[in-house]
Image: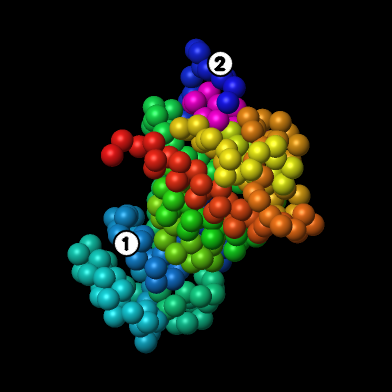
Amino acid sequence: MAKRNLKGRKPAPRQNFRPYRKSNSGSHDRPGRWVIGIHSVREALKVRAEAVEELWVRGDGPSTGDEKLGLKIHQFIEKFKIRPKQVSTKSLDELGSGHQGLACRVTTSPKLDWEGLAAKEQALVLVLSELEDPQNLGAILRTAWLMGVDGILTSKNRAAQLTPAVSKIACGGAEHVPIEIHTSLQRALTILKKSGFWLYGLDAEGVIELGQTEFSPKVALVVGSEQRGLRSSLRGECDQLVRIFQTEKEASYNASVAAALGLAEISRQQRRLRPS
């Protein structure tokens, strides 16, 4: 792997980056964001119960389908003295489908620590360019959480946002992995390079297969849109373009599947290099 000269380069100040914030419209137009679904609400209560300002429960109770899970949620409610509010199914439906009779509003989200990233010897960041499908974003969030991703950067335009439905699909991932929205991903990639990251783009025309790639200790994995793939400007920023093996050249992987395969291989290599 070629050496990149990073001498004298410093990460940009954190104020250049603003974490995503979204307020819901209509009767839910308040600061923060809504989290729906049993697993996602459990994780919100688990990692930032102090930030839970409202907890909505359907009149007949949530549909946990799991007594242990229901008990765990009840324990969090008791521990942090959160008073659930009984609401109608219609009110919950307005937040998003698949709520399972449970929702909460949190005032804070995970923050990406840029200074910490720059100081790390080993790190993993995921960059999503114009990923438009909420299902894909939710699935990627879930995978990123389980793979230990340090943060996700996503584009502002033509991209899915962190909605209640996405938090449901993520099954708790959105409560653990910081997401930042950027008007210019190209600029963000430049900052990652200055922080010691090597950039690897997933691309069907990549010069090397995923399984043959020797990843650096600090990796930024760049994933393109479902339809257009990586933009040429982002391809040019990547240190290496990596392809995933497939038997059919005319077809392509779903974006969330491609991201999962890439993250799994990078995580495997990083675990191998960690001191035991």
Our reading of the magenta stretch's main secondary structure is helix
Q: Is residue 209 above or below residue 70?
A: above
- Furthest residue in direction right, as rendered: 250
- Furthest residue in direction bottom, as rendered: 60
Q: Which residue has dot 1 on it?
A: 45
Image quadrant of residue 51?
Answer: bottom left
Q: Secondary structure at mark 2?
A: loop
The C terminus, quarter of image: top left
- Marks 2/1 in contact by CB < 8 Å: the verdict is no
Q: Measuring from the top left, give residue 108's x and y in whole percent.
A: 40, 51
Query: How much space separates mark 2 and mark 1, taking CA atoms?
Result: 44 Å
Left or right of residue 86, residue 71 in this image: left
Q: Which residue has dot 2 on it?
A: 5
- Bounds of the magenta span? 186-198
Q: Which residue is drawn at the image coordinates 54% and 60% (left, top)?
A: 139
Q: Which residue is drawn at the image coordinates 41% and 48% (left, top)?
A: 148
Query: Is residue 10 one of those drawn in magenta?
Result: no
Q: Residues within 10 Å of mark 2 (few under 14, many from 20)?
A: few
- Amino acid identity at mark 2: Asn
